[in-house]
Image: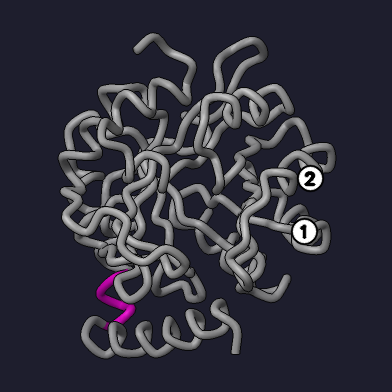
């Protein structure tokens, strides 16, 4: 069993436990009563000649690196991101492998004038999508590597019905074909192979030529320097999703401005 298979097996067991604590019908009622979220896709769309957008991530740990920022205060960090130009905020909500929670997402999304918030988790079930909607997310991550093409389409359509956007994540051409069948507004290329956790920026640079220009195109993982950001922006990406470089920086606000090419 590789790492991704281990995570998926654990996630299915976790979903079952949560459903026993809170039935899906309760979540459906709460989701219908929730106010409409701000548009994730609109926040990331980059008109020609405009600077690249940045999705700044709240991430305490990872399966490959272990603890990154164990004492991270989600609300405080989100405010730093907001003040320094983040177009959107990604919140890891997986507890077992990333030390995150839906409570983190809820606190960030409830912040006055918060940018759109992405629920970043291993989404396998409509139940998780409703949880994200109730917590205040504007979008959820759907990972093609975790889903069959049919399940990807089913979860994408369900996400749209809730009023949220979905960031569909791919790592290869076959995954991209499944993603394009959903006709998403936002598509992301993960430079990290979720089976080996190896990172290579060339993945984004190779796949960008296959991403339709009308979609919001996001590069994810392995972005650490201003040169990385410039290279990906020049290649045509609208937005970058950055986590590790920000949460491990002694000054996340300055690091965010550096990646955006703004004065220190």
Mark 2 and mark 1: Cα distance apart in space: 8 Å
Q: Residue at x 33, y 63 (%)?
A: 93
Please name whichever residue, 229 or 93, is drawn nearer the observer in this view of the structure.
229
Q: Which residue is drawn at 39% across and 21% down?
A: 257
Please name whichever residue, 16 or 173, is drawn nearer the observer in this view of the structure.
173
Residue 11 as seen in the image, left or right of residue 197: left
Q: Residue 222 carries which label?
A: none
Quadrant housing residue 233:
top right
- Quarter holding the N terminus is bottom right
Residue 48 location, x and y as percent? Answer: 67, 14
Q: Mark 2 points at which residue?
A: 207
> How would you rate the neighbour count of disc 2 (Cα within 10 Å): few for under 14, some for 14-19, many for 20 or more?
some
Q: Mark 1 points at which residue?
A: 172
Quadrant housing residue 250:
top left
On screen, 117 above or below 46?
A: below
Cβ–Cβ below 8 Å for labels 2 and 1?
Answer: yes
């Amino acid at each position: 069993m590789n790492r991704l298979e281990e995570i998926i097996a654990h996630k299915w067991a976790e979903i079952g436990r949560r459903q026993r604590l809170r039935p899906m019908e309760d979540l459906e009622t709460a989701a219908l009563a929730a106010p409409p979220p701000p548009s994730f896709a609109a926040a990331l769309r980059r008109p020609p000649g405009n600077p690249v957008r940045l999705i700044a991530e709240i991430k305490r740990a990872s399966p490959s690196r272990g603890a990154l920022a164990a004492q991270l205060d989600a609300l405080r960090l989100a405010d730093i991101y907001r003040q320094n130009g983040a177009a959107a905020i990604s919140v890891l909500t997986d507890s077992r492998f990333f030390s995150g929670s839906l409570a983190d997402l809820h606190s960030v999304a409830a912040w006055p004038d918060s940018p759109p918030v992405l629920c970043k988790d291993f989404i396998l079930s409509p139940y998780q999508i409703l949880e994200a909607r109730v917590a205040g997310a504007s979008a959820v991550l759907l990972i093609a590597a975790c889903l069959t093409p049919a399940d990807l389409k089913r979860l994408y359509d369900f996400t749209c019905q809730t009023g949220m956007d979905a960031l569909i994540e791919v790592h290869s051409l076959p995954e991209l074909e499944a993603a394009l069948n959903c006709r998403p507004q936002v598509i992301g290329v993960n430079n990290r192979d979720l089976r080996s956790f190896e990172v290579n920026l060339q993945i984004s640079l190779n796949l960008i030529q296959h991403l339709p220009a009308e979609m919001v195109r996001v590069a994810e993982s392995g972005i650490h320097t201003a040169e990385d950001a410039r290279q990906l922006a020049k290649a045509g990406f609208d937005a970058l999703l950055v986590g590790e470089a920000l949460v491990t920086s002694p000054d996340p606000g300055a690091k965010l401005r550096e990646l955006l090419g703004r004065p220190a």
